[in-house]
Amino acid sequence: MTAVNSLLCLLDFKREELERFIRNAFLMKDLYKVNAVPKKLSGKSVALIFEKPSTRTRVSMEVAINALGGHPIVLNKSDIQMSRGEPVEDTARVLGRMVSAIGARVLNHSTLEKLRDYSGVPVINLLSDLSHPLQALTDYMTIYEKLGRYETVAFVGDGSDNVLVSLMAFASVMGLRIKVASPKDFRPRPDIWKRIEEKAEETDAVIEFYEDPYEAVRGSRVVYTDVWVSMGQESMAEEKRKKLKEFRVTKDLMRYASSDAIFMHCLPAVRGEEVDAEVIDGPQSAVWDQAENRLYTALSVLSLLVK
Ligand code: CP
Ligand code: NVA
């Protein structure tokens, strides 16, 4: 389908390719519900490496690979020789000779690049310190499903968040608008931000930063947040909680959004921190449908990328 058979960053794809991932996810949703997913991975194995915990990503990938007729091999870091210092390059060379694709959730994004460069098989980013493309594809699928179009997202919280980076990448390829409410010192990593800005210029996408969450959320149909302390950031927890305390999604904040606004969160959530329980558990919350859609995105991406 595409010149790039790995999915490390949504910025590597063209608009038509991102649209195709989402269109195919809707098709997979229909097929999955009638047990008619094509067995495109029949006879193939896919390795799934996890350097960090996961619920949604691991389960959606395992179920998707099985539904496509393939065999998932889950490798938690402590199970494999990488934990004893075997180089990522060597791990990649060996896996590439035995499996048809590799999914990996990594501490450092550069591990994904090494897996891609040395394995010779498609590599799928299952979350890194930098980005989370499967999540953002799912999120825009869910926005389209609920609101009939790829609406502007108002993101409230950590402006350097990995999920936010992928939402920005999607928006910048597709020419969409994102409003981010975050303290000034929480911004995406400069290298990825440069790529996002360049792409946005090409497509007329608009990415705006606000320091007032009420201003960012005003009139929006999508209000999104993620945890303040991501996996691997435990040493920064206290500082982040202090700086982000005004950036919580509350019922009061939701009142400034459009009356038909949905609340989104990639999960896992910390109630009382980035979001109040009455919002995530309330009538505007889309988070459970959003989580379910991870499965159809996994089916879509695997069926298009793995040959
Ligand atoms: N949203 C998400 O990636 O969840 P997990 O960490 O449970 O995989
Ligand atoms: N930003 C979060 C996302 C979890 C799915 C983290 O990296 O921990």
Image (cartoon, rainbow, N blue to C red):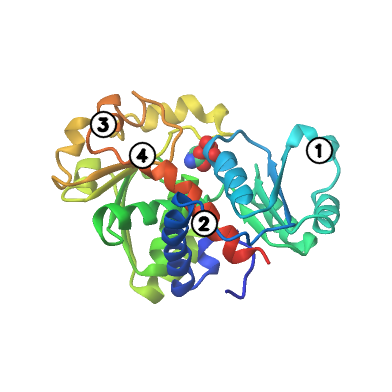
- Nearer to us in this view, 232 or 90: 90
Q: Which residue is mark 3?
A: 279
Please tell me how crowded label 4 is: few (under 14), some (14-19), or many (20+) other residues with Cα within 10 Å. Answer: many
Q: CA distance from mark 2 to mark 3?
A: 36 Å
| Closer to the eye: label 3 or 4 | 4
Q: CA distance from mark 3 to mark 4?
A: 10 Å
Q: Are marks 4 and 1 in contact (CB under 8 Å)?
A: no
Q: CA distance from mark 2 to mark 1?
A: 35 Å
Q: Which residue is mark 1?
A: 80
State the residue at coordinates (74%, 62%). 121
| Residue 152 falls left or right of residue 61 | left
Query: What's the mark number on residue 36?
Result: 2
Mark 3 element type: helix
**Looking at numbered disc 3 in the image, what kind of residue is underneath it?**
Val
State the residue at coordinates (52%, 50%). 132
Please tell me how crowded label 2 is: few (under 14), some (14-19), or many (20+) other residues with Cα within 10 Å. Answer: few
Query: What's the mark number on residue 287?
Result: 4
Tell me where residue 65 appears, x and y as whole percent: 63, 50
State the residue at coordinates (49%, 71%). 17
